[in-house]
């Protein structure tokens, strides 16, 4: 295994002989073998972050729940199931994904503000470990459904602690009036009603204050705010099985940014818990998503055209777009873009754009690159909220994903074709092509096209 250690951390992507590699795989080879756009993940990179969390939290009973929405591809979930992860999910679809990847239902916690009756019934029938309830009406709904199923529902209360995590407003979830969680000021009275709700079993409290949090201080503040509530509950005899402190640890997308290391997060949380709740017996859970997978993935894309505008702007039009990587268009997010092969020529400033018919479909503004038609580019730190946010907008097929381990590449998803796009759609009239014939025609045409 290529271990390019910088500080004490494995770098899943590094240049070898001027060519960007994922572990031992030359990314030009990956693009040649599978085409572009292509997501490439490093197995070692994901596992290294996972083990960093495990090691950091090892001092107490704990669980690391991987937040599935960050990257919900089955092969990634399978890797984490094998590593021993638990899972935080936000839909019945994500529950099924975890089960399909070999996870156990009791390893799952189910979060989310809008759980339907169907979602809740499914979660209970499938046996998920805990439902994180985000409001009083939701608790009432869970109780009714559990009662009619003749079960007790394991629940935790998602609390909004009113902590400003100092993150972008797009990803803040724990401040003021938010759709997320039960306000901390209402939490005690809600908990007091719980013993009357016979079909509910209070397991714990959960918080998730946002994403891309770079300092431990908001987490410490959260513990300080939760502590009196925990003490009040325990005084009432409501002993918590777990205290779930959420996800949100920041990763560095730019060289100037810092990553919140699991070790620093765990030390700060444990120190604050020792100070505020020295008697606490509850398990300590966290729900990292981005910080497990982001740095272990890249999106490979190829330059299709160079276009020079009349007013001095130059565009590199690439074969990836907002449909493969939505974050730049959705949040103005930054992903480093680099040439897979270190270029020789002079650099110029380009806007790297996709071909979707939206002016926000720009993957990178004003990037200094040396590119021409055919240049292979890597969008870095794309392992989280990349593929899981991909869409078929503009009827673009979803890209392929591969997992690299050492010098091996394992496909995790085949490339969708245009013939897959409308498989679920219905026509009102008779006028329809035979899907099988159409698919065969497409494949025949693609066969010829590939030889040109
Ligand atoms: C999204 C989410 C997470 C994970 O957030 P990251 O920023 O990816 O670590 C954890 N818990 C809940 C409830 C979430 O909604």
Image (spheres, rainbow, N blue to C red):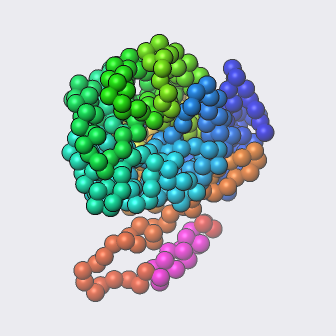
> Is any part of residue 374 visible from this angle?
no
Q: Is residue 391 magenta?
A: no
Residue 222 as seen in the image, left or right of residue 57: left
Query: As displayed, is residue 407 above or below residue 186?
Result: below
Q: Does the magenta stretch mainly form a helix, a strand or a loop?
A: helix
Q: Is residue 308 left or right of residue 342?
A: left
Residue at 36 percent across and 32 percent down: it is: 238
Vertical position of residue 330 compared to residue 102: above or below: above
Q: Looking at the picture, tell me which residue is in the foreground, 214 or 287.
A: 287
Classify 199 as above or below 232.
below
Judging depth in this view, the residue of 257 and 135 nearest the camera is 135
Q: Which is nearer the eye, 79 or 10?
A: 79
Quadrant location, the C terminus:
bottom right
Percent position of residue 29, x then y:
70, 50
The image quadrant where one finds the N terminus is top right
- When asked about the image quadrant of residue 202, the answer is top left
Q: What are the residue bounds of the magenta stretch?
A: 436-449
Q: How many marks?
A: 0
Tell whether position 448 is magenta: yes
Task: Locate residue 310: give its quadrant.
Answer: top left
Q: Is residue 192 visible?
A: yes
- Residue 263 place in picture, x, y as percent: 59, 22
Return the residue found at the far top: 275
Image spot of residue 296 (x, y percent): 60, 38
Residue 203 location, quadrant: top left
Q: Residue at position x 44%, y 39% from top?
A: 363
Q: Residue at x 50, y 50 (%)?
A: 106
């Amino acid at each position: 295994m290529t271990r390019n250690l910088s500080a004490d951390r494995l770098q899943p992507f590094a240049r070898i002989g001027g060519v960007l590699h994922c572990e031992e795989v030359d990314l030009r080879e990956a693009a040649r073998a599978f085409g572009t756009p292509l997501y490439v993940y490093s197995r070692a990179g994901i596992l290294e972050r996972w083990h960093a969390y495990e090691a950091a939290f090892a001092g107490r009973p704990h669980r690391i729940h991987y937040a599935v929405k960050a990257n919900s591809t089955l092969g990634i979930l399978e890797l984490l199931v094998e590593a021993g992860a638990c899972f935080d999910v936000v839909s019945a679809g994500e529950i099924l994904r975890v089960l399909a990847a070999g996870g156990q239902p009791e390893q799952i916690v189910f979060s989310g503000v809008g759980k339907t009756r169907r979602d809740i019934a499914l979660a209970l029938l499938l046996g998920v470990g805990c439902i994180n309830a985000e409001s009083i009406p939701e608790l009432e709904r869970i109780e009714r459904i559990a009662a009619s199923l003749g079960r007790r529902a394991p629940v935790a209360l998602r609390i909004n602690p009113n902590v400003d995590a100092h993150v972008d407003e797009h990803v803040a979830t724990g401040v003021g009036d938010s759709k997320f969680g039960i306000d901390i000021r209402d939490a005690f009275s809600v908990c007091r009603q719980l013993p009357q709700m016979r079909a509910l079993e209070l397991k714990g409290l959960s918080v998730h204050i946002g994403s891309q949090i770079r300092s431990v201080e908001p987490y410490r503040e959260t513990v300080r705010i939760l502590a009196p509530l925990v003490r009040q509950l325990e005084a009432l005899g409501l002993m918590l099985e777990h205290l779930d402190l959420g996800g949100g640890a920041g990763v560095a997308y730019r060289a100037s940014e810092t990553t919140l290391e699991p070790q620093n997060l765990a030390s700060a949380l444990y120190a604050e818990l020792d100070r505020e709740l020295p008697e606490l017996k509850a398990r300590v859970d966290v729900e990292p998503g981005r910080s497990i997978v982001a740095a272990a993935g890249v999106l490979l894309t190829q330059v299709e055209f160079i276009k020079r505008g009349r007013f001095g702007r130059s565009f590199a039009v690439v074969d990836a777009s907002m449909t493969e990587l939505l974050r730049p268009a959705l949040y103005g997010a930054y992903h480093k873009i680099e040439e897979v092969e270190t270029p020789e020529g002079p650099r110029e400033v380009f806007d790297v754009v996709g071909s979707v018919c939206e002016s926000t479909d720009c993957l990178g503004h004003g990037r200094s690159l040396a590119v021409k038609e055919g240049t292979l580019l890597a969008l870095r730190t794309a392992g989280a909220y990349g593929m899981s946010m991909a869409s078929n907008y503009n009827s673009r097929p979803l890209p392929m994903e591969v997992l690299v381990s050492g010098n091996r590449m394992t496909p995790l998803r085949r490339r969708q074709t245009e013939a897959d796009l409308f498989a679920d759609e219905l026509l009102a009239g008779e006028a329809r092509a035979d899907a099988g014939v159409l698919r065969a025609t497409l494949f025949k045409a693609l066969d010829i096209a590939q030889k040109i």
